[in-house]
Structures are given as C-alpha cells and as structure tokens.
Image (spheres, coloured by chain):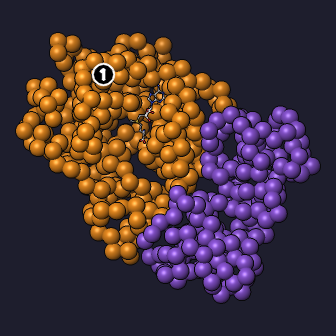
Amino acid sequence: MEPLERYRPIVDEFESFLAACERPLGNAVRVNTIKASVERATAALEDEGVEFERASWNPRVLRLETDSPGSTWSSVHGFTHGQEEVSAVPPIVLDPQPGERVWDCCGAPGGKATQIAALMDDRGTVVANDNNLGRISALRFNAERLGATSLAVTNADARNYSLKPFPFDAFDRTLVDAPCSCEGTIRKNPDALDDWSEGHLHSVAGIQKGILRRAIQTTREGGTVVYSTCTFAPEENEAVVQHAIENEPCRVVDFDLDLEYAPGLREWNGETFDPTLERAARIYPHHNDTGGFFVAKLEVTAE
Amino acid sequence: MTDDEAGGTQNDGQRFDRLPTTAAERTVEGRASRREVLEYFGDRFGISPETFDDYTFWEKGAGKIWIYAGEASSPVEIEAIGMTCLRTRQEHWKPTTDFVQRFGRHASECVIELEPEAARRFVAGEDQELEWDGDWGYLVVAHELAGDLEPIGVGLYVHGELRSMVPKGRQRVL
Ligand SMILES: C[S@@+](CC[C@H](N)C(=O)[O-])C[C@H]1O[C@@H](n2cnc3c(N)ncnc32)[C@H](O)[C@@H]1O
C-alpha cells in the first residue's frame, strides 16, 4: 500500500480509500446480451440456485455470491462473463451504436471488446486489437464463447496501427483501455504494487501517449475516443489526456455515469491541466466498493 | 450481400478468404460455397437461410469456416473474423460448439434434448449410451434451462451412443 501514500492530497476520505484497497473484491459478472437477455440470464442463475445482487448503476452488472462463477450453466452458455464491475464502465461511456465501426486498440482478453459488441447488438464492426499474441488467444476464446460475430481480431502495435485489412479509413469510436501500472486492481491482485516505481509510471505513460495519439488519428471527425486505465497515477491519466488535447484535434467532453466518482484533476506535482480535465472520472475503490478506474471521453474535432 | 473471392487457386492457411456465392464461382479447389453452407444448415438442422442474411462466411486453413457480421476486405490476414462455425472438406461436415450455442436456437431438426443429469455429463465431455430415433451423425445437443430449450453444443450420435464434442476448454464439471 506504500506507493498509494502519494495520493493522500488528492483522494477524499483517504483512510476509507486505503481500507477499501485492503478488502478483497467480490465476483462480478456482466450479462452477455448477445446470448441472453438480462431476464433470461437472471432466471437461469435463479434456476441454478446461484444468489446474486444487481449493481444499482447498471442492470447488466451482477454481483454473484459464489466462489466459482465459472461453474454455472449461465457461464457455460455464455450468458454471463466474469468482469470486474468498474471494468464495465469504459464501454458504457464509449456508447457504441449498432452498425458502427469501433476499434478497441488494447483489447485482450476481451471483456470490454465483447461488451462493446453486445452494446451494438452484435451488428457493425468491432476490431479488437492487442500487441501481445499470448493474450490474443484468450481474446479469441472469449469472443467465440460469448458469440460475438461482429468482432475481428488483429495483432499489432496500436501506436502505428494500419486499417489496411478493412474497407474503411476511419473508425466511428475508439476505446483506449491502456496498459498501465494497475494500481486500481490491488483488491483483485494483492501483489499489483510489488514492482511499483515512479520510473515505471513515466515509461508506461510514454506508451499511453503514443497509443492515444494513434486512436485519435484513426477516428473520424466528430467521432468518440474513450481513454481509460485501472490506475490512479495522474502521470498515466490526466497528463496523457492533456498531451492529446495539446497535440491532436480533440476535446474532452462530459458524460453521464450513475456511479459515485471524483472529477479529474486540475494539477498534480506542479503540473497544471486544462480545466476540461475535470470532465474525466476518477473512480476510487471506496466510492462504490469496486476496483479503481480512470475514464475520459474525447471528441475528435476538425484539424 | 455478395460473396466474391479474390486471389489464387490454392487455399492459404494464413489468411481469410470470403466464400464464393455458388460452386460455379469457385476458384479454390475444394472450397465450400456460401450456398452449400446455407444448404447444409438448412437440410441438416432446419435453420432457414434468411437467418444468415446479414453474415458472410470465410475460410481460413483447409475447411475451417468462419461466420462474420462485420466488414473486412477479402482476402484478409488477421487473427480472427467473427467465429468458427463449421468444419468442411471432410465427409461429414461438423458445426462448432460456439456456433451451436449462438445459432442453435434456430434449429428445428437433429436437436436432441437431454435430461439434467445427461446434460451435466455431456458438458463434462463424457460419452453416454442414449436412445435417439432420429438421424445419426452430428446433433445439436440441448437442455431445458429456466423454462426454455437451450443448446449446449455438438454431439456425435452413432451406435446408440452420444459422444460429446465439447472442446476441452469449454468442458465444465457442474
Ligand atoms: C488493460 S489491458 C486491456 C484489457 C481489455 N481492454 C479488456 O477489457 O479485456 C491492456 C492491454 O494492452 C496491451 N498492449 C500493451 N501495449 C500495447 C501496444 N503498444 N499496442 C497494443 N496493445 C498493447 C496489453 O497486451 C494488454 O492486453
């Protein structure tokens, strides 16, 4: 927990933040509406005697009271997919529509890519990319298990991505669920902070900036780019978005989210950020009893 | 939607090629056509061809057919395009577990319904002796879940035995 001390000045109720970070996380699942409606999936769980609670902010997110959420008929049929509750936030902010062309540029193992396909009623094109071939096999497995027929998988570095395989030259929406220092996953992986260093934050921030830049370039004017991480470090969040708005044609926009969260920061360690960064969301573990996440929504503007 | 086929006369294992609409338009030896695929799903399982109006079919590797709802150029070299749905280029074509789970609800023939215990054995990957007076060969295996019939996967029925074709990674002990 040591590295988290640096966030004392920016996190309200810091002690309850720390206490929440110490508590293990429950088993959340997302209902995969490609294969079953929420009614059907919950009826199947009830039929099997699996107890669950519905997340107040989203009808498709359930908290299961079982230690083996994978050993249910609902899971066999792909009605439900194990996915951390806050991890369902970025696709909802992205708000993809049926028939659109959407790029999930850091897509493996596919929790969010399949959620995007489901939000589009599995109609349109979802390109799920990852540069890590090993993680691609998990992505493919999940996509097929969940029945996502609108999803294509590519294996490339997002920073110099080419749209050549596709008969269009821009996406309508892009999700950048960036590789990060993962501080916000501490409740799931107690060793998440073991290799923490400030140097690491800065090197991964360089990658994040490169990926976000390419995401904006490949998204059409008027299109949407969502930038998210599962970390608290402003170096990887506000500073990355700040870099994007200074260097690429885009602006930070508002969004509605029925969860408790804090606004994005205006400054950190002497660096100031554009006032629009306050439109981003910092979701802390003590807010909704979840993991931690950062989400910013961008609109691509004219050059 | 039209299916056109670009490229050479050899099947290339590294890339996806869209299936030709009919056998007459075929340029690659042994490749199934879209029409043959629709006929197979219709004849064997009673799935009406309109079910697939918004989908294209692709081949990667000899005989592995993929079903896709999105846009892509053909041929295309990527990791995956939609989902694998069918294995052709063998005497008896074989649908995949994932396809049957996704589209099996449209099937009206060659669907076998299992009792709860038999369904559990099937999803655990076990073969079992069962009565079935329909066709032999690949079947859609289903069970009742929360008041509705739900397809689990593909079984091979021969000589009074139902063999589970559920791949290892999808088997579960429930
Ligand atoms: C936070 S994870 C994505 C999780 C995924 N969105 C999900 O919901 O299942 C970040 C991913 O980015 C990938 N990645 C890292 N650097 C990348 C790069 N330069 N280009 C593309 N992907 C990259 C990693 O392999 C990792 O799978």
Count residues near mark 1 (Cα–Cα under 10 Å), then give few for <14, some for 14-19, many for 20+: few
Residue A263: x and y, percent? Answer: 21, 31
A55 left or right, relative to B155: left
Q: The disc labelled 1 sits on which kind of residue?
A: His
The residue that label 1 is drawn on is: A200
Q: Colour of chain A?
A: orange
Name the residue: 33% across, 32% down.
A229
Name the residue: 49% across, 81% down.
B117
Residue A204: x and y, percent? Answer: 35, 22
Picture quarter with the C terminus of chain B: bottom left
Task: Find numbered disc 1 in the image and state the secondary structure of the residue it sits on.
Answer: helix
Answer yes or no: is residue A104 visible. no
B57 left or right, relative to B173: right
> Label 1 lies in what chain?
A
The single residue placed furthest to the right in the displayed view is: B24
Residue B87: x and y, percent? Answer: 73, 56
**Toward which corner of the image does residue A213 lie, by quadrant?**
top left
A76 left or right, relative to B16: left
Indicate whether A64 appears above or below A104.
Answer: below
